[in-house]
Image (cartoon, rainbow, N blue to C red):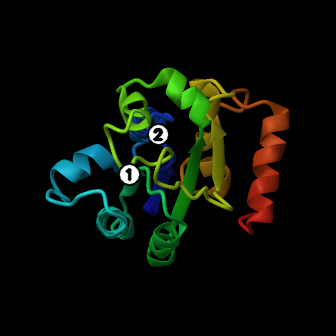
Amino acid sequence: MKGFTLWFTGLSGSGKTTLAREVEEALLERGMKVEVLDGDVVRTNLSKGLGFSKEDRDENIKRIGFVSHLLSRNGVVAIASAISPYEEIRRRNRDMIERYVEVYVRCSLDELKRRDVKGLYAKALAGEIKGFTGVDDPYEEPKNPEILVDSEKETEEESFQKIIRTLELMGYIPGADNSDEVSPEEEEKIKQRLHDLGYI
């Protein structure tokens, strides 16, 4: 199988990293080479020293995109999990990476504030963190992601199965005997989305 990049975008706490790790495990079980590039980990290593201005955020996403490009063109599945709030820089990565699949993990701000696993939204709303995406810095929603999961309305398993089935239908990953994991209605929605985007 050829390499490709699976790019998870969404607000902090939406479930990007959790889903990325689940997909990683599933693809490893299918014998694929996989590398996860998590936004927090990348900032500690590849992007150390960058701040959170728009320019620095763009630079961070460019770096993740470039590494994903190198990995995927060499037969590795690069799974990137980063907020990546700006449409322009996501489009730049899409243009650079030949086989690019965007996963938008959607979740409302109200639900994220309710979860607030790291306590970041409370601090941002109290003014203790400035330039926080979704609070006082914008998040530009993807217009046409290949995969849209809603972590507020779907279970983690439903979102995971939607991602896996889409990748199977695109021919990016080998199929498995899991035809009953996705409902017929969801299967039709996936096929229609891929048809509308010109994949099938």
User: Dots 1 and 2: beta carbons under 8 Å?
Assistant: no
Q: Where is residue 171, by image quadrant? A: bottom right
Whole-percent x, y for residue 10 in the image: 51, 46
Residue at which label 1 appears: 131
> How many numbered discs, if any?
2
Q: Give the CA separation, mark 1 to mark 2.
A: 20 Å
Which amino acid, by three-letter code, is at mark 1?
Answer: Gly
Which amino acid, by three-letter code, is at mark 2?
Answer: Lys
Whole-percent x, y for residue 56 in the image: 29, 65
Residue under the point 76% across and 63% down: 200
Tell whether 176 sits left or right of 194. left
Residue under the point 48% across and 34% down: 15
Under tag 1, what secondary structure? loop
Whole-percent x, y for residue 199 in the image: 71, 65
Extreme residue in the front direction: 127
Under tag 2, what secondary structure? helix
Question: Closer to the camera, 24 or 86?
Answer: 86
Residue 40 visible in the picture: yes
Mark seen at residue 16: 2
Classed neighbour count for the residue bearing mark 1: other residues with Cα under 10 Å, few (<14), some (14–19), many (≥20): some
Q: Where is residue 67, by image quadrant? A: bottom left
Whole-percent x, y for residue 39 in the image: 32, 49
Residue 134 vertical position relative to residue 25 in the rendered view, above or below: below
Residue under the point 40% across and 55% down: 77
Classed neighbour count for the residue bearing mark 2: other residues with Cα under 10 Å, few (<14), some (14–19), many (≥20): many
Tell whether 67 sits left or right of 103. left
Q: Earlier in the sequence, mark 1 or mark 2?
A: 2
Residue 177 visible in the picture: no
Question: Closer to the camera, 140 or 61?
Answer: 140
Closer to viewer: mark 1 or mark 2: 1
Mark seen at residue 114: none
